Amino acid sequence: MSHISCRERRFPLRLNTCFPELYSEYLHWYRHLIERLGRDKTNTMWKNAFRVYPHTLVGGLLSSGWYTDSEIGCDVNAKFKEHLERFFAASTTGVSIEDAKQIVETTPPVPQLRSSLLSFSEVRMSTTYESLLLLKEGFALLAQSLLDSCGTAGEFIIYDILLEEIEQVGFRPLTVKEFIAQRKERFCKAPEIPDMHSAGLEVEVISSSGNEIITYVRECEWARFYRERHPRVGYLLSCSCDDAVYRAMNPRLRLQRTSTLMEGGDKCDFRIFAVNGEET
């Protein structure tokens, strides 16, 4: 058994990377919701979601700790244009690129990011909790608004959105042996430079074999963020697609989990194993 604790809880949050990803994710959600709910209902739900956005908290986060990294070179505006064209250029939703751009550009924290920071070369040493407040708060509010509007059907819509995001990532296929080896290596030592997924994470590798690995997550900033701010949608947004991610890497992989920090347990007990079948 081995144990890692990523005690270094801060990592470089780079605007040239996180801002385009946020922009793309908002566009994806907006297109997906219009396809299922129609334009008017989506716009109403979208507007209602952000009535309670924590502008003061996010404003405080954007007002301090940022510095310019002169070595960063990236045409972020070109990325924004690329994302707009990908989701809405051939859209059959009746929403033009300009309409979609207007929605995203007025959705928090996009206006705040544009007005508060000097350039896309800005970087901030951030905690995972701070990064989630900046980058995921809006999606939690959208999810809650969708459940208020659609009830249980809203859960299926959100899950479909998340599955589409997994498909778009295009995970590299791995053999079962490669997957287990990589997971074991990842959780047997703390990363040299933590990121949003590892900062504040404490994991034990309980056991591993050729076809199975068991890990216990003892501490997770994602769970803390959602438990404190959005317990109603935390599991759905952060945990519900774990099994789908593993199957995207190898269709033989399965996840068995009986407890999560997100749902108030004392740990997340991940048992990932391979079922019989041919490797692909």
Image: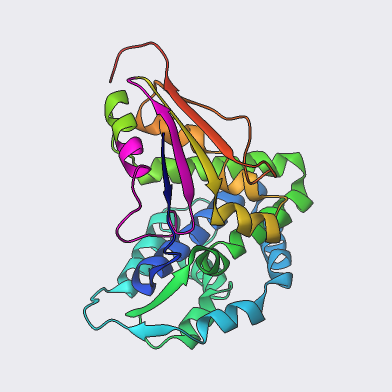
The stretch in magenta equals: 182-210
Q: Position of residue 202 (x, y in %)?
A: 48, 49
Is residue 53 in view from this perspective? yes
Residue closest to the eye, 240 or 115: 240
Q: Is residue 23 magenta?
A: no
Q: Position of residue 178 (x, y in %)?
A: 27, 30
Q: Is residue 190 magenta?
A: yes
Which residue is painted at 44% across and 55% down in the image? 87
Which residue is painted at 56% across and 40% down in the image? 160
Corner quadrant of residue 246: top left
Q: Position of residue 207 (x, y in %)?
A: 42, 27
State whether residue 131 is above or below residue 39.
below
State whether residue 248 is above or below residue 124.
above
Q: Position of residue 26 (x, y in %)?
A: 52, 61
| Image-based side of 22 in relation to 235, left or right | left
Residue closest to the eye, 128 or 103: 128
Corner quadrant of residue 197: bottom left
| Image-based side of 148 in relation to 9, left or right | right
State whether residue 232 is above or below residue 256.
below
